[in-house]
Image (tube, helix red, strand yellow):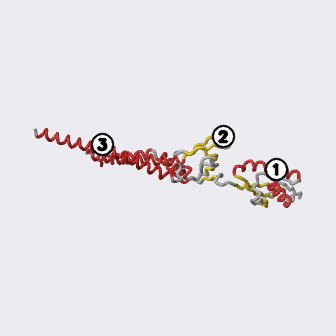
């Protein structure tokens, strides 16, 4: 009879603990939902990217539910210290196994938070030398589309650990030209011609500096430079068009563009 009463008492205590655990589960889920709504409203007031918001909300939800499960296990009578130790060990093992993926994941989060570039920007990864228009930014990789319509997938870990050039960061860009002319050519005429070409081009911004100059004195040519400013989206079309215009105009004005050559002098003794 004493044994029956003992088991009955334990059963009643266990049943009460299970009932309390179910109540904690019900109330805990309601609290978590309420907390997530507050977090979601707080994120809406910030400029954090949607992908980062979703990730952070999922992470907060997972952490809150883990805490809730630990509280319920403790109430039921399951040793939470062993449970936490198992979770910690599993976390370390998973972290070591997915070290590269976690690095890319962390890089993706940093890119989405710091926003060094966005979809539609033309970027150059100075670490790998890859460049193109950003087509998609994922948590693990960034997808670029090259000018010749190839798709490049770059791990975010590499992007965050190298210098990135964002060619679309500003509305305007400077276009630089370097043209070699012969040493006996009229450099003043060449400079004036380049400035006229810049002033007459339809895409060149006339309120910005149009500057022609002598860049260097090379072995077989005088290098004349031209700098103009254009809207970012007009960069390449302007570059190609002005290069062609320079060649045609220099030919019409007899400004020689020399090819690389070597003069040999032979002495008769």
Q: Are marks 1 and 2 in contact (CB under 8 Å)?
A: no
Check contact, mark 2 vs mark 3: CB within 8 A.
no
Which quadrant of the view contains residue 2? top left
Q: Could you tell me if residue 92 is visible in this image?
A: no
Q: Position of residue 110 (x, y in %)?
A: 52, 52
Is label 3 or label 1 in front? 3
Q: Dividing the image into 4 quarters, which one contains the N terminus?
A: top left
Name the spot of residue 42 as percent of width and height, x first. 47, 53
In this picture, residue 241 sits left or right of residue 92: right
The crowding category of the residue bearing disc 3, from other C-alpha atoms within 10 Å (few below 14, some 14 to 19, many at least 20), is some
Q: Position of residue 58 (x, y in %)?
A: 44, 46
- In depth, the one of 53 and 42 nearer the eye is 42
Residue nearer the viewer, 169 or 179? 169
Quarter of the image with the C terminus in it: bottom right
Q: Earlier in the sequence, mark 2 or mark 3?
A: 3
21 horizontally vs 39: left or right: left
Residue indicated by mark 2: 149
Q: Residue at 63% across / 52% down in the picture? A: 166
Residue at image position (49%, 50%) is 106
Which residue is outermost to the left? 1
Question: Do the residues under discs 3 and 1 have CB atoms within 8 angstroms?
Answer: no
Residue occupied by mark 1? 245
Give the number of callouts: 3
In space, the residues marked 1 and 2 are separated at their CA atoms by 28 Å
Give residue 188's position: percent from left, percent from top.
85, 61
Q: CA distance from mark 2 to mark 3?
A: 57 Å
Q: Nearer the viewer, mark 2 or mark 3?
A: 3
Q: Residues within 10 Å of mark 2 (few under 14, many from 20)?
A: few
Residue identifier under label 3: 22
Q: Secondary structure at mark 1?
A: helix
Q: Is residue 255 above or below residue 12?
A: below
Q: CA distance from mark 3 to mark 1?
A: 80 Å
């Amino acid at each position: 009879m004493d044994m029956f009463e003992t088991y009955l008492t334990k059963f009643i205590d266990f049943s009460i603990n299970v009932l309390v655990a179910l109540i904690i589960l019900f109330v805990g889920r309601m609290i978590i939902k309420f907390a997530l709504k507050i977090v979601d409203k707080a994120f809406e007031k910030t400029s954090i990217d949607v992908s980062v918001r979703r990730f952070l909300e999922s992470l907060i939800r997972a952490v809150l539910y883990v805490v809730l499960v630990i509280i319920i296990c403790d109430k039921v009578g399951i040793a939470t210290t062993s449970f936490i130790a198992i979770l910690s060990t599993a976390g370390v093992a998973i972290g070591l196994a997915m070290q590269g993926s976690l690095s890319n994941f962390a890089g993706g989060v940093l890119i989405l938070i710091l926003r060094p570039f966005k979809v539609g920007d033309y970027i150059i990864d100075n670490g790998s030398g890859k460049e193109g228009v950003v087509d998609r930014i994922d948590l693990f990789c960034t997808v670029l589309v090259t000018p010749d319509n190839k798709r490049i997938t770059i791990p975010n870990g590499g992007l965050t650990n190298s210098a990135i050039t964002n060619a679309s960061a500003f509305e305007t860009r400077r276009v630089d030209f370097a043209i070699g002319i012969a040493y006996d050519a009229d450099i003043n005429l060449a400079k004036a011609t380049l400035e006229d070409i810049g002033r007459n081009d339809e895409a060149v911004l006339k309120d910005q500096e149009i500057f022609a100059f002598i860049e260097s004195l090379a072995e077989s040519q005088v290098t004349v430079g031209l700098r103009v400013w254009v809207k970012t989206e007009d960069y390449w079309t302007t570059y190609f068009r002005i290069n062609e215009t320079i060649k045609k105009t220099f030919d019409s004005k007899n400004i020689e563009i020399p090819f690389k050559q070597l003069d040999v002098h032979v002495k008769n003794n």
